[in-house]
Amino acid sequence: MSQTIDARGLSCPQPVILTLDLIEKTQNGRIEVLVDTDTSKENVTRAAESRKWKVASVAGEGEGYRLVLTKG
Amino acid sequence: MAGKNYFASRWGIMGVGAFIGVFAALLQYWGNPGNMGICVACFERDIAGALGLHRAGVVQYIRPEIIGFVLGSLIAALSFGEFRARAGSAPIVRFILGAFAMIGALVFLGCPWRAVLRLAGGDLNGLLGLGGLIFGIYLGTLFLKGGYNLGRTQKTFTSVGWLLPLLMLGFLVLRLVFPPLEGLPNNDILFYSLKGPGAMSAPLAVSLAVGLAVGILAQRSRFCTMGAFRDLLLFKQGHLLSGVLSLLVFAFLTNLVAGQFHPGFVNQPVAHNLHHWNFLGMTLAGLAFALAGGCPGRQLFLAGEGDGDAAVFVLGMITGAAFAHNFGLASSPQGLGPHGAAAVVIGLAVCLFIGLTMRQKQAA
């Protein structure tokens, strides 16, 4: 099952806080994160990788991006 | 969509920190005040003075570096398709935080950038400033952990994102139309210091060029002196910190070569050695920057890429500088301003009020 975080419009460091919170709760699986700036995309990517999650895909969506994070 | 952003890598941000460190020290060599090659707070304060928003005669100059930071970021954001006009995330809060961040910085006499540069020039009072900064940011992370949030921003008309860059362009036009006149304290509407740090500056073209380059590089790398410590405390991530450490090392080395390294606590340029006020001033500034989501430089770069809320923070800082000098809140090399201590206490109280009350749990 995939869970989605809508971090669009949230400024630094909120997208990373939300992502790491869910990563802690989820342990394994799939998380989708919506962001609207390149900075948030990079920060979420860096945060996920630091917790040994993979960024499976990054797709442009609207004015921003949809990141798919997976583990396990 | 841009591909892999090299500047956002570890080597990228360290390179940017090195560039800023070297050129900040060189700007001092070329004429900027001591250990103040670049100081976002001091330079915005000088701009406030040049516009006559305060009348402290020793700190009045339209600093081209600030203009360059915003316009450089604008150029980078437009070039890489990252310009996004956005606004509406608690602008009044950002304004107030900007004002008190400036007041705290002026009690210490420097923003986080200058705290690092002061240390790189041998001013050991910078250690107290950095200690206070880190403590203030630590307090900010406690609020962030407790759910503190400024709320979502909204996409808006492109013109909204252009307003602060256009304002900076306007300042540049004023500087060109009303240049400093030898021996005169003003040229029509603009004020120019005849003595003090406001009278010390690198040549206009040099300051502007370095400012533009820093603006471009910092927009690409997301360089942030507050985020450096916040990310370490909050996420145990040292990415941004590596940029700040690189700045420190390269500014130190450049100072050493240029003969600008003078270690000690006393007789440091544009500094006082009241340890607890250096610490507390930067505690206030650090907390305000943490609650606002970026150091003063980062706010300029965000404003350049269309962030109208960061632009409001910048205007808050400029307004805070005017209050700081009109009300006797800013320190000087002689020590604390007459009401500086009260301003720090009030500022901390305001930040606590904001941090404790703006807690909205996000629906994931």
Image (cartoon, rainbow, N blue to C red):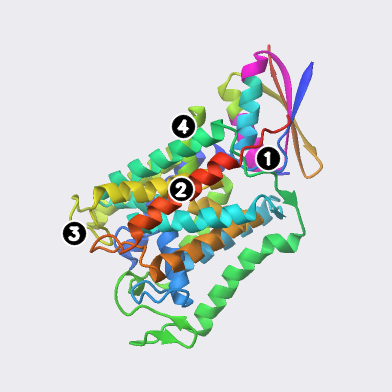
Determine the CA span between mark 4 and mark 3. Answer: 33 Å
Tell me the crowding category of disc 1: few under 14, some 14 to 19, or many 20 or more residues within 10 angstroms, Cα based: few
Kindly identify which residue carries mark 2: B349
Judge left or right: residue A13 versus residue B45.
right
Residue picked out by circle 4: B232
Quadrant including the N terminus of chain B? top right
How far apart marks 1 and 3 lie (CA) works out to 49 Å
Looking at the rendering, the stretch of residues picked out in magenta corresponds to A24-46
Question: Of the residues under marks 4 and 3, which one precedes in the sequence?
Answer: 4
Label 4 neighbour load within 10 Å: few <14, some 14-19, many 20+: some
Residue drawn 56% across and 60% down? B70
Q: Which mark is residue B267?
A: 3
Q: Reading the chain from its start, which is encountered first: label 2 or label 3?
A: 3
The chain holding disc 2 is B
Mark 4 and mark 1 on one chain: yes
Quarter holding the C terminus of chain B is: top right
